[in-house]
Structure formats: structure tokens, C-alpha cells
Image (tube, rainbow, N blue to C red):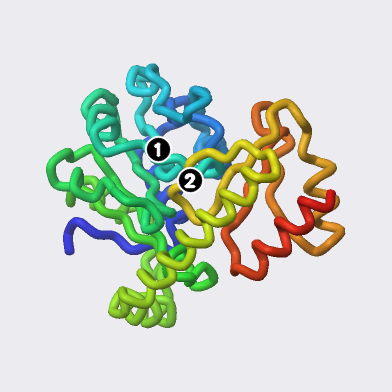
Amino acid sequence: MDHILVGNGSDELLALVLRATIDPRDRVAFPVPTYSLYETLVAAQGGEAVTLPFPEDFRLPPALGRARARVTFLCNPNSPSGTLVRLPAIEALAREVDGVLVVDEAYVDFAPTHALGLVGRLPNVLVLRTLSKSFSLAGLRVGLAFGHPELLAGLRTVKDSYNVGRLPQVAALAALGDLPAMRANVARIRATRDRLTAGLQRLGFDVLPSEANFVLARRPGVDQTPTARALAARDILVRHFAVPGLHDALRVTVGTDEEIDALLEALAAS
């Protein structure tokens, strides 16, 4: 129990990490593009965000471990790419960084491997999980942090006394007590993800290998703003990032089979 801390969603746990570990102008490193909240949280604490671009295959940037950062974030599987950094590379990074390595595993239940085994062996590793994705409890806000007791003790000093309400606790216990239901949900999403990937590839998209509950589909060099708007006009909502490096891509959540059929039909007609 002393290796686990419960939070009001994993977003609160991310905020607690920075509140407990960095002072103004301290460096916080992470590869980009990734979860946009990291940069917001660093700015709120007055830290310096050190962003290192992913290469095209979304392997770890070689300089990430040498960034001299108090905290290093790794979203794994990454958002918005869905790509997965394998365990040996994560362990090597943890041994190289100067400070805390936070492995944000919000989507890891859709992937074949995870980093929980590093907790206990490496005292600077903090692994975050959420019940918002594979357990479908996003609105109840339950996150879990796994780390060395001394590391978690620092987070407890800055958290609210009663940060997780009674109803989310009851729901979380029920969900964790019914893992077969979650695993069946994950299996369905994986199967639909494969079908979505194949369908997008037939339509000419480049699709990165995803280990999450979404895919990143790209038409290299072609701005996807018009495509996202045309889909929205048909009540089909996908994520478009109007930023350098992602303007030619769409992030598509793995919905129901009927929703995926509607998306592929609309893209084929556009």
C-alpha cells in the first residue's frame, strides 16, 4: 500500500508531481508531440519546459536523458501517436536522467507491455495509471500513482486532504474487482483498432502502429483541416492539431464498429 497513491484522475497526480518537485525555472523535459497538459502544468509551476522532438518513428529522442531535468515525463503509449517505447529503453532512460522519471501509462491497458516492474527497483520511477480509458470511468476521476514510498510521501505533503470522493472510490473498487469486463472491453477495442487501421490505409493514410485506443492517421504534407471540418459537418468528430508537425494528421478514437464504418464511409466519399 505504501507504493500506491490515489488521485483525482491522473491529471491531478501529474500536477502533484510538479508541485512537490520543482521550483521556478527548474527544468522539466519531455518528448514532443505528446500530451499537451505537461507544458501547461510546467508553466503553472514556473518551471522551464525542455521539449525534444520525437523522430519520425517516435523512438525516444537520444538527448532526453541528458536534459538535466528535475522531472522527465514519458507518455507511454504516447498521445497523439499511440506509439509505445519498450521496457529496456524506459529502464535505460530512468538510469540516465538526473531526477524523477514519470511514466504516464494512461493507455497502457491497450498495449502488450508496461513499466510497473521498474517500481521498487528504481526509486526515481513513478508510474501513473487512470481508470478513465480501459475502465471507461473518465467522469469519476480516479488515477493511481505507483512509486517508491519516499517519493509518494513527497506527493502526499502537497495533495488535498480528501482529494478523491467516496463515490469514485466505490466505483473504482468495483471496476478493479471486475477485471474480466475491462479485458473484454480492451479486446474489442484492439480488434476494432486493427480494422480501423486497415481501412484508413486503404484510403491512402499513413497510420502509425498504435498501442492505444486511438490511431494517428497522416496524409504527409496535406493539411487535414478541411477533412476534419467535413467530418464535423457530418457529426463525426476527430482530433486535428493545427500545429507544426501534425497539421497533416488526424487522431481518431477507436469507437464502436458502427462509428468506424460511418467514418470510413465519410472519408471515402470526401
Which residue is depicted at the point 43% across and 54% down?
Answer: 107
Give left or right: position of 62 versus 96: right
Residue type at mark 2 is Ser
In the rendering, at what x and y percent does residue 30 appear? 45, 31
**Farthest residue toward the front?**
202
Residue 44 appears in the rendering: no
Q: Which residue is mark 2?
A: 210
The correct choice, above or below, for 6 with respect to 217 in the image is: below
Query: Where does the image place residue 225, in percent across and percent down from the top left?
Result: 80, 41
Front residue of 151 and 266:
266
- Mark 1 residue element: strand
Residue found at the very far left of the displayed protein: 121
**Where does residue 114 sit, x and y in percent of width and height?**
29, 49
Please report the residue visible at 30 percent of the width from the left and 35 percent of the height from the top. 100
Residue at image coords 39%, 47%: 104
Sequence order check, earlier mark of 1 and 2: 1
Answer few, some or many: residues within 10 Å of disc 1's Cα (few below 14, many 20 plus, some between 14 and 19). many
Q: Is residue 4 above or below residue 170?
A: above
> Does residue 93 lie above or below 230 as drawn?
above
Out of 220 and 239, give the one closest to the viewer.
220
Give the residue at mark 1: 74
Q: Quadrant of residue 102?
A: top left
Mark 2 element type = loop
User: Measuring 83% from the left and 53% from the top, which residue is drawn there?
Assistant: 269
42 and 206: which is toward the camera: 206
The kind of residue on which mark 1 rests is Leu
Left/right of residue 10 with respect to residue 206 in the rendered view: left
